[in-house]
Image: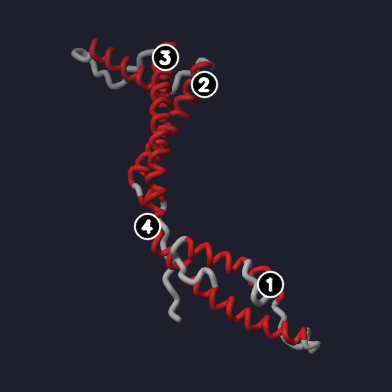
Amino acid sequence: MAKQQQFAVPTMEEAHPPLAALTARKVDLDSRSRELEHDLMRLRRGKAPKSAVAAAAAEGQARAAELVSDLVDTDGITPRVRVDLEGVRHQMQGELDAVNAAMALVDREIEKAKVTAANTVVEKVRPTYEAALTDLASAIAVAIEAHDRATAITNELTQDGTPWTGRLPQPMSLRSVFGVAGETDTRARTFLRDLAAAGLYEKGGK
């Protein structure tokens, strides 16, 4: 029998691209939130973020150059940098609040998208999955019949008083699944009945 190619189960992101986009945006927002938290913590210690220092320096250099560029070369101009820490803190806190609000909205949309994605994935795998269960049911039905034949023989040997243990293979480990010959309430038969109830096997009552 030729080996069947393994079925590739799609991820929820593959099955529903909007979920992938939302997840990627959440990663970006989370990174931005952590960056802002870090900068705000530095501000509480009196340390301005590098970005704020760079912006203040650029603004100062531009203004100084504007004042004298008609007379001198301003390439080396380096005015003292002053950063409005409270103003920066206020701006960053506002940005953090907006980022966190956006992230909360994205989280809600992700949960909705996951429902759609899960349903899509399930429907994609359903035919292959149900076909596998149907094949399994057929194999189990054959196994039940073979097990019943084997146990019927050993039962008759036992009833006749013929010593057979140690002389014939004794797969006792299978009893928990197949029971003994004629037993109806076994795990194997229950499995077949369950598949029959799901419409995947016609001989579930065997």
| Front: mark 3 or 4 | 4
Q: Mark 4 — residue?
A: 124
Check disc 3 and report the residue beneath it.
Answer: 90
Q: State the quadrant of the N terminus.
A: bottom left
Q: CA distance from mark 3 to mark 2?
A: 13 Å
Q: What is the image's colouring?
A: secondary structure
Identify the mark nearer the N-term, 3 or 2. 2
Query: From the viewer's perspective, is residue 178 above or below residue 166?
Result: above
The residue most toward the left is: 70
Secondary element at image label 1: helix
Q: Sequence-wise, which precedes: disc 4 or disc 2?
A: 2
Percent x, y of residue 16: 35, 48
> In this figure, which residue is indicated by the disc labeled 1?
175
Mark positioned earlier in the residue sequence (3 or 1): 3
Secondary structure of the residue carrying tag 2 is helix
Q: CA distance from mark 3 to mark 1?
A: 73 Å
Circle 2 sits on which residue? Answer: 41
Residue type, numbered disc 4: Lys
> CB atoms at circles 3 and 2 under 8 Å apart?
no
Could you say which is closer to the camera, residue 191 or residue 173?
191
Three-letter amino acid code at the position of disc 3:
His
Mark 1 nearby-residue class (10 Å; few <14, some 14–19, many ≥20) = some
User: As shown in the figure, which amino acid type bears the numbered disc 1?
Assistant: Arg
Q: Which image quarter: residue 174?
A: bottom right
